[in-house]
Image (cartoon, grey):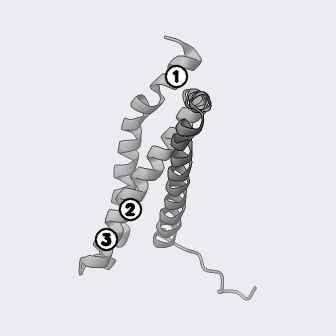
Amino acid sequence: MPAGTLYRGREGMWSWVAHRVTGVLIFFFLFVHVLDTALVRVSPEAYDDVVATYKTPIVALMEYGLVAAILFHALNGLRVIAVDFWSKGPRYQKQMLWSVVGIWIVLMIGAIYPVLHHAYLQLFGK
């Protein structure tokens, strides 16, 4: 590859990638959620078995990942709207991204207890 042709993306590219990835993950969750909810009409016992697996610590970690994806996607979506519709948005897009990341981190720290407390009790007891 000739020198200087490799694109080394900065914050804008990585936020674009993260926005798409979180969008796909959220879509996948919604697809699975619709399928498992529909299972109740086919076999209530199978539905109960599926719901029982949702109470495991591994699924709790996946739920925390889902919270992370939804929060980032929502906050970054607001940033994208600001960049698109605010005349000074493109000039401040990098600062807005770092603000989104900071708010996201604070909210994710706040989500640790409500989302992972049950898994912690299952693994380590009271």
Q: Which residue is mark 3?
A: 81
Residue extending furthest toward the front:
42
Among the two numbered marks 1 and 2 on one chain, the one whose residue lies closer to the N terminus:
2
Residue type at mark 1?
Tyr
Element type at marker 3? Answer: helix
Q: In the image, residue 18 lies at what x, y percent?
A: 51, 62
**Mark 2: few/some/many CA within 10 Å (<14, 14-19, 20+):** many
Report the Cα–Cα distance between label 3 and label 2: 9 Å
Q: Are marks 1 and 3 in contact (CB under 8 Å)?
A: no
Element type at marker 2? Answer: helix
Q: Which residue is mark 1?
A: 120
Residue type at mark 2?
Asn
What's the residue at 58%, 19% (across, down)?
A: 123
| Quarter of the image where the N terminus is located | bottom right
Among the two numbered marks 3 and 2 on one chain, the one whose residue lies closer to the N terminus:
2
Q: Are marks 3 and 2 in contact (CB under 8 Å)?
A: no
- Using residue 23 as the reference point, say whether residue 8 is left or right of it: right
Residue extending furthest toward the left:
87
- Residue 4's quadrant in the figure? bottom right
Q: Which residue is mark 2?
A: 76
Instruction: Tell which of 16 and 39 is nearer to you.
Output: 39
**Mark 1: few/some/many CA within 10 Å (<14, 14-19, 20+):** some
Report the Cα–Cα distance between label 1 and label 3: 38 Å
- The image shows residue 118, relative to residue 59, as above or below, that is above
Element type at marker 1? Answer: helix
Q: In the image, residue 93 lies at what x, y percent?
A: 35, 71
Among the two numbered marks 1 and 3 on one chain, the one whose residue lies closer to the N terminus:
3
**Mark 3: few/some/many CA within 10 Å (<14, 14-19, 20+):** few
What's the residue at 50%, 39% (across, down)?
A: 63
- The image shows residue 121, relative to residue 18, as above or below, that is above
Q: In the image, residue 44 lies at what x, y percent?
A: 56, 30
